[in-house]
Amino acid sequence: MRSKKGLSVFFFLLATFAWTQNNRQAKLEAQRKQLQVEIKQINSLLFSNKKLEKTALTQAEDLAVKISLRQRLIRVTNEEANRLTQQINLNQKTIERQEKELKDLKSEYAEMIRFAYASKSAQSRLMFLFSSESFLQAYKRFQYLKQYAAFRKKQGLLIAEKTKTLEALNETLLVQKQKKEVLVKENRIAQNELTAERLEQKERISSLKNKERSLEKQIQKKQRQIAAFDKEIQRLIRAAIAASNKAAAGKNKAVFTLTPEAQLIGKNFTANRGKLPWPVEQGVVTLGFGTQTHPVVKTTKIQSNGVTIATPDNAKVRAVFKGIVMQVFSFKGSNPGVLIQHGNYITSYSNLAVVYVKKGQTIDAKQAIGEVFTHPTTEKSELKFSVFQNTTPVNPKSWVYRM
């Protein structure tokens, strides 16, 4: 009884392991395909116009984005290929075990056939029965012959089943080997492209070496502009909180005093964490959230309260969740933007060319609220997207699906 229980546990663990492997393999495949799409988008959005006049710094920054994506693609493809190797090895061992079991079954069956042939005549079977010393022994012998015939049939069916299982395993193994060959080929191409991109980036950075101090000043100036912009956004949110609290006689100055309806929207927004749609139909994140080292000038840190998304020209911007337009804003030296309140959360959409909505308007999820601004010189179209919980910026990548 113990051995049967132990065998059941073994097969359960094996099945669980196989399911976990297949589940992880499916996720890796989805990631690989998504990264391939993003690299195509990057090429289309940032590198399609060869005549475009870009500064050496901008060219190096754009290459850094593509190199980062390419490195992730290679890592994911490597892991996928390694897991396939594990599955191939596991299947190979299973096939070897199945082949041995099939061989033993066929050997046993052959022995049974030989025995059956030696006693195949009805006379032999009758002699076997009539030579019994008692009726009970004759009955037992009859039952034995009956059971033996049934066992022969069962062995034949088991051989057919084992053969079918073995054929299926061999087919799976062949598919896995072909898939691995494709992955290895894709990775080889990706490695070659990465080498070429790194070489190009090295040349760009080399041409910037003498201008490093000047570049640091440029980046720091840009960072001061971004910090001032972020400060203005947070000022607008604080003003909205103050107005909300004044209307509702709330005492906490740091958070919204919400109506029951607004509280429900906030709860629904929280419940959809990681599932929110992208603020544009097509785009790639070119700058992430938080403090990070500049991709080209490594001595300089950059800070972002949200993410920057490269988009096609004049891309439509859409709300990621239902809410109310809290503010349509435009600061000196920047393009317009929209703040949408979702209970105690606010989403910010800035660097717009056209705004379709107005303050106080109720907005549905995926409703168009404007168009991304396309820079006339660089021809870059970039949306700056942020998420705030009250006045605190949070990482949009944690909220938007597959960002």
Image: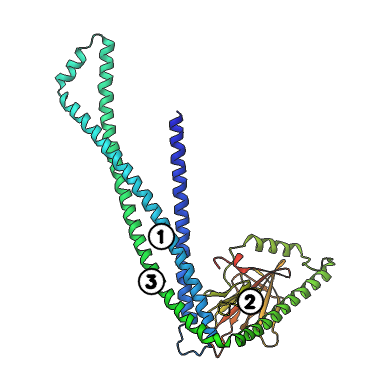
Q: Position of residue 91 (x, y in %)?
A: 36, 49
C-alpha gap between disc 2 and disc 3: 33 Å
Query: In this orientation, which residue lies closer to the viewer: 84 or 347?
Result: 84
C-alpha gap between disc 3 and disc 1: 15 Å
- Residue of label 3: 189
**Residue at image location 35% in from the left, 64% down from the top:** 182
Q: Quick one: SS at disc 3?
A: helix
Query: In this orientation, which residue lies closer to the viewer: 300 or 109?
Result: 300
Amino acid type, label 3: Ile
- Residue of label 1: 81
Amino acid type, label 1: Ala
- State if disc 1 and disc 3 touch (CB < 8 Å): no
**Residue at image location 75% in from the left, 77% down from the top:** 236
Q: Disc 3 or 1, which lies upstream in sequence?
A: 1
Amino acid type, label 2: Lys
**Residue at image location 33% in from the left, 60% down from the top:** 178
Looking at the image, residue 138 sits to the left or right of residue 18; the answer is left
Q: Quadrant of the N terminus?
A: top left
Task: Residue 208: give its label.
Answer: none
- Residue of label 2: 301
Q: Disc 1 or 2, which lies upstream in sequence?
A: 1
